[in-house]
Image: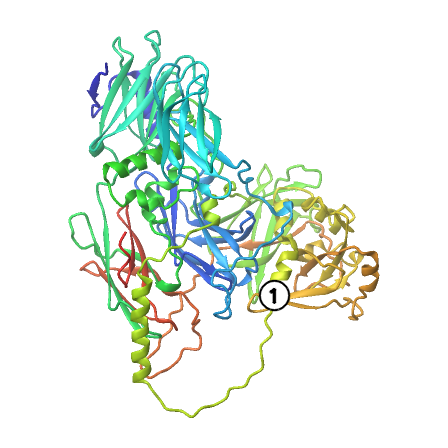
Amino acid sequence: MLLLGTLPATAQNSSVFERFFANAVTFSKTFPREKVHLHLDNSSYYQGDTIWFKAYVVTATNNQLSNISKPLYVELLDQLGNVLERHIIKLHDGEGEGHIALTNTFFTGYYEIRAYTRWMLAFDDASYFSQTIPIYRKRLTHKESPRSIAVYNMDKSMAQRPLPQKDELEARFYPEGGNLVQGIPCVIGFETVSRDSGFVNLDGFLLSPSGERTIPISTIHDGMGSFMYTPREQPANVEILFRGRSYRFVLPKALPQGYSMSVANRETSFDVTVKRSSESLTDSLALFIFSQGTPHSFNTIEFVGKVSKTLRIMKSDLPSGIVRMSLINAAGHTLCDRFCFSYPKKTITMKGVSDSKVYTPYQKARYEVKVTDTEGKPVRNASVSIAIRDGERTDYIPASQTIETDLLLTSDLKGYIHQPAYYFEEQSRGRRKLLDNLLLIRGWRQYDITQLIGEKPFEPKQMPEPNLTLYGHVDSWFSKQQSNIAVTVLGKRDTIYVSGATYTDSLGNFSLPMDDMYGRMESVIQTKRNGKQKNRYADVSLYRNFEPGLRAYDWRELHPTWEEPVDTLALQQLVDSLTTNQLEANALQIDEVVVKGKKRHSTLKDTESFERDILAFYNIRKHIDKLRDEGKYVSNEVGFFLHNLNPLINPEGTQYGVNPLRYSVNGEEIQLPYIEKDLDMVETAMLYMDKFNRYAYSVDDNYRIQKSELTDAYTHLRVDTASQIALNKYVVRCAFKMADNWSSNKNYRPSRGIRRTVIQGYDEPKAFYSPIYPESGYFDSNADEMRRTLYWNPNLKTDENGIAVVEYYNGSYTTYMNVCAETLVDGVPASLNAFSYPIRKK
């Protein structure tokens, strides 16, 4: 029998739990957490494109724009997990904007863009923004594939992400509340994932101890489902049917005794039931309710001679978003933990109106967006980020990542969430069930809240950054801290110079403010003892290598299914009629002519061939900087350094596995001894299978490979390949790109007391370029007519009627428009994903 009670507005008298609650309140105020969302201008990109983005950084408690951090770090990672670019965005009251030019992106693939503040990494369960975006091969003609991604045969030294799933089918089980207890019925969430197709919806059975099928089980959405199970001493088996085969999995082992917690998601309440396995268990218990790490309320659990107790928690009393319910004892240990979702009480609505369904080439277009609050009143002076895209050439997945899903849902969950906006499209009983099932699985974890309630000290892993500051440390060559050392930093970019000076403290640490610095600068850090003429023999390390841990990709992120949102047949008929009318209106009779032209040689086949030969690509400069930042010794021997990057290269740098290793510099072959001491001048290294020592490569403006015969760096004569062919061994080539001022006749060994590095400031703001095509027929030669983002504005403002109007010009295709707009109004996120042409009915 269940005892049903109502959760009181004020906590009951219980000194130990009151102390826990008060400590949790103090903790949340002392260490407020942040979240971040990036609004991207598009869903996919091509080589040479630019990624435009708007950043919203909020305090996790109430989604209000944050003033805790000023620098925001935005990174672009390749498919294997290597950080290719890092940008620092200057936030103004929690908002910022930036761009990433894909002009140096030779490799195609599924890239990850992630964003975080330094303060977000202070906690064990670091929260950050992450989104996967495809970067396709630049398309030069209509005959080339519109979504081309190369296949590479990279060696293992390039793979940084966690290993992918090995088994053909995996089934993972998540007991509600965290634990199974013998004899207490429990809901178990489960998911089924295939190695070659990601999540799969499957059927199966719970098996009896003798192996007989008992209860049928099924996944219900995106490979996730749940079933009821009463555990015994020996864990039961589950049978899953997949592709005509039967797979067996063992459920988690149950505790012999203890407590369990279950949540019934009602329309207006959460009914939380706590059960104990025996009346002999008499722990003092309390149910704590948290929202984004902030304690909301608690209630002590009194069984009063019963083995179960149910508390009713009204949804109207809860804040919006993820709500965490934790059952803890008087020692501060978490016995059970459960995530629930509370739908927002306040809403912001965005609606848009376009002036046409379809737009002809270079046609002027107008779009109007209106923002209203819960009562339908206009929201004045709302800041809206808006992207207008060529709808027919934009990759579309319905119910994808938005500012609402990031701030209210996915930032608190583990793993990839497929089509997260699907869970917000309606609040029906069935949809609430699916959302609850998602939280049961993606929110499952073993929590320790002893730091939160003051039972265990907390030391942040990182500190907040109210301003951009360069932090560093000086050690002697014998790793002894150097105090009172003068540290001078000199930076140069083009004709701009910056400098700064300070002294190390008693622990050898120093800091220099950089809040007024923009861009990247080649810099020299000099150390000197005060009053001495010569530089100090010292190692300078910098505290700038903080980043989230790498995550594994979900199968769906590497195999997206793009959809057509509109009726393509009806659209094509309309486009054909518009094209015909336009041709008739501009018809001009001309005589028949014969056009002759030279056939352009395509380098696509050469590019594809070279891509298959690539073994590895290293940013040598970045690797060296990171090692020195961490206070590690960097050998100036090229071969030994490459060996540490890739064990297949021998320490002498002469072999890659069983293959000879040859070197080239800026496209010309060079012998290893001539660059043996020049490691500090190496920018990047490309390893590729050069077969019989026959070619060099370069990348043209269209990201195509241009092959050429190898020449010697000193004689400039063609390199002889006959001797290598006679050996019948393929050559592996290491192609170095050197710094612009490199010369093989100079010595680049590190100097006494001097560290050369690149210092990075904030990104310099840049405006999105919107071409104009007046009716006079003027053609804007600066415009990219293959562009798919036609308009981007990160800071569009609504007027006194809550309306904002944009005018722009279509590109070179007849198309419909896809509009993606987002805003954050007083802690309430909202988004709009609309089409000028009517979308297909579900």
Residue 764 can be seen in this image:
no
- Above or below, 10 relative to 726: above
Which residue sits furthest top? 280
Q: Residues within 10 Å of mark 1 (few under 14, many from 20)?
A: few
Q: Nearer the viewer, residue 793 or 381?
A: 793
Which residue occupies 20% across, 32% down? 268
Q: Is residue 263 above or below residue 157?
A: above
Q: Which residue of the protein is positioned furthest toward the front in this rendering?
A: 244
Residue 233, quarter of picture: top left
Q: Is residue 616 visible?
A: yes
Farthest residue toward the bottom? 591
Q: Quadrant of residue 231?
A: top left
Left or right position of 98 against 834: right
The type of colouring in the image is rainbow
Split into 4 quadrants, where in the image is the N terminus? Answer: top left
Left/right of residue 480 with respect to residue 177 in the rendered view: right
x and y, in percent, of residue 255 in the image: 43, 16
Q: Is 795 or 528 nearer to us in this picture?
A: 795
Dot 1 amino acid type: Lys
Residue 123's x, y, as percent?
A: 45, 35
Q: Residue at x 73, y 47 (%)?
A: 649
Tell me the residue that label 1 is attached to. 605
168 is higher (above) or lower (below) than 585: above
Q: Percent from the top left, x then y, of residue 238?
A: 44, 26
